[in-house]
Image (spheres, grey):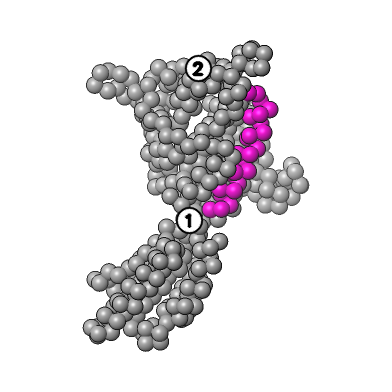
Amino acid sequence: EKVNRIIREEMNAIGGQEILLSAFQPKERWQKTGRWESMKDIMYQFHDHSARDLGLAATHEEALAEIATQTIFSYKDLPLFVYQIQTKFRDEPRAKSGLIRGREFLMKDLYSFHRDEQDLGAFYEKADAAYRNIFSRCGLSFYVTEASGGTFTKEFTHEYQVLADAGEDWTLYCAACGYAQNKEVSSLAAGDPCPKCKKKIQMARSIEVGNIFKLGTKFSEAFGLLYANEFGIKKPVWMGSYGIGPGRLMGTIVEVSHDAKGVFWPDVVAPFSVHLLIIKTKDEKAARGVEKAADALYQTLLAKGVEVLYDDRADKTAGEKFADSDLIGIPWRVVLSANTLSKKCVEVKRRNEKEARIMTQKEFLAHILPRKAK
Ligand code: ATP
Ligand code: MG
C-alpha cells in the first residue's frame, strides 16, 4: 500500500484519474486487435457454463479503447488519462521468483488518449518524469533503457531497469551519463564506447520495474475510436500505455536492500517505522515492569502517529525475536528489557547499522519524529 500510495500520488499529479476494470474479458473484444490469437500462450482463456469464451486480462488496452468509444467523441474530450492498480493474469512459463514474476500480479496501468502524435509525445515525457519520481522515491537507482515495443509498436519503448543479479533482463549501460539499452535491442557490447559520452559501456543483469509505450492509433483504429476535430473531421485517437508492477517493485527493493539475515526497508515504504520488542525476564515482578513500560511506549508512539509493530509474544526467546526483526526489516528496532529499564532507557538500532545505542525514550522520540514529519 505504501508503494501504491507513491504511485497514486505521482499518477494523480500528471492528471491521472483512478478507475478499476474487470479482469474478465470477452473473446470478441480481443479478436478486434488479433490478440486473442497472438497472446493465447500468455492469456488464460476458457469458457463459462453458457459456453461464452472468456479470458483473464493480461493487460487492458482493448478494454480501455472500447470503453473510450463511449466517452470520447470530440477534441473537447481530449486528452484523457486513466489508470488502475489491478490484478493481471499471465500464464508465465517461467513464474519462479515470487513477487518478481507471478501468474497473478498487481499492475498499475495508465492509458492516455490524445488528439495527435505531438500531444502524445508531450505526455510521454511527463509520464517518464513521473516514473523517475516513483522509483527514486522508493529508494531505487535505475536506468531508463531503450527497449523493444514487442507487439505494440515498432518504435523504441522505455523500460525502467534496476541492476540486480536476480533480474532476468540484461542492461547495457553507461554509469557516467546514464545512457542505457536493453540487450534485446542493442547493438552495443560491454567495453564499447558510450554513443553519447564515449565512456565505457557496461552490462549487468537487471529487473524491469516499469515500461512506457506509445501505442499510436493501432487500438483506436481497431475499435473505431475516433474524435471530431474543430472542423468536424473524424480522426483516430492517439494512445499510450504505461505500466508498473507494484509487487515486482517491492521484490526489487528487497533484492537491492538486504543482508544475509533479511530485508532493509527504506523508511518511505517500510510497513512500520518501529519494531518494538519486549525481552522477557525470569523475575516475574521485573517482567511485569518491562511489559508495562513497553505497553506505555507503544501507546505513546501510536498517539504520535508512528507506525509500530509490537512483538509482545510471550513464548519467543530474545534470539528468535531479534532474528524475526532482522528478517522483516523494519527501519528502527527498539528493545525494552529489565536491563534497559534499570537504566531508564531503551536500546535502539537502525536495521542497516551494526551498533545499537542506549538512549532515553525522549531521545528516541526526538530521533524518530523529525523523520516522520519529512
Ligand atoms: P517482462 O518482460 O518482465 O515479462 P513485460 O514487459 O511483459 O514484463 P509489461 O507488459 O510491460 O511487462 O507490464 C508492465 C509492468 O508490470 C512490468 O514493467 C513489470 O513491472 C510488471 N510485470 C509484468 N509481468 C509481471 C509478472 N509476471 N509478475 C509481476 N510483475 C509483472
Ligand atoms: Mg515490459
Residue found 55% across the figure and 55% down from its top: 139
Q: Amino acid at mark 1?
A: Val
Q: Amino acid at mark 2?
A: Phe
The answer to whether any part of residue 185 appears in the image is no
The answer to whether any part of residue 315 appears in the image is yes
Secondary structure, magenta segment, majority class = helix
Circles 2, 1 touching at the beta carbon (< 8 Å): no
Specify which label sits upstream in the sequence, 2 or 1: 2
Q: Which mark is residue 223?
A: 2
Report if residue 86 lies within the magenta region: no
- Give the Cα separation between the discs numbered 2 and 1: 40 Å
Q: Position of residue 78 (x, y in %)?
A: 59, 26
Q: Point out the image quarter for the C terminus.
A: bottom right
Helix, strand or loop for disc 2: helix
Residue found 71% across the figure and 52% down from its top: 176
Number of numbered markers: 2
Q: Nearer the viewer, residue 127 or 162?
A: 127
Report if residue 125 lies within the magenta region: yes
Residue found 41% across the figure and 25% down from its top: 40
Q: Is residue 326 left or right of residue 221?
A: left
Q: Is residue 130 left or right of residue 105?
A: right
Considering only vertical position in the picture, is 247 above or below 92?
A: below
Q: Quadrant of residue 129?
A: top right
Q: Nearer the viewer, residue 202 or 260?
A: 260
Q: Which span is picked out in magenta? A: 115-138
Q: Position of residue 135 (x, y in %)?
A: 56, 49
Q: Quadrant of residue 343?
A: bottom left
Which residue in the protein does label 1 denote? Answer: 269
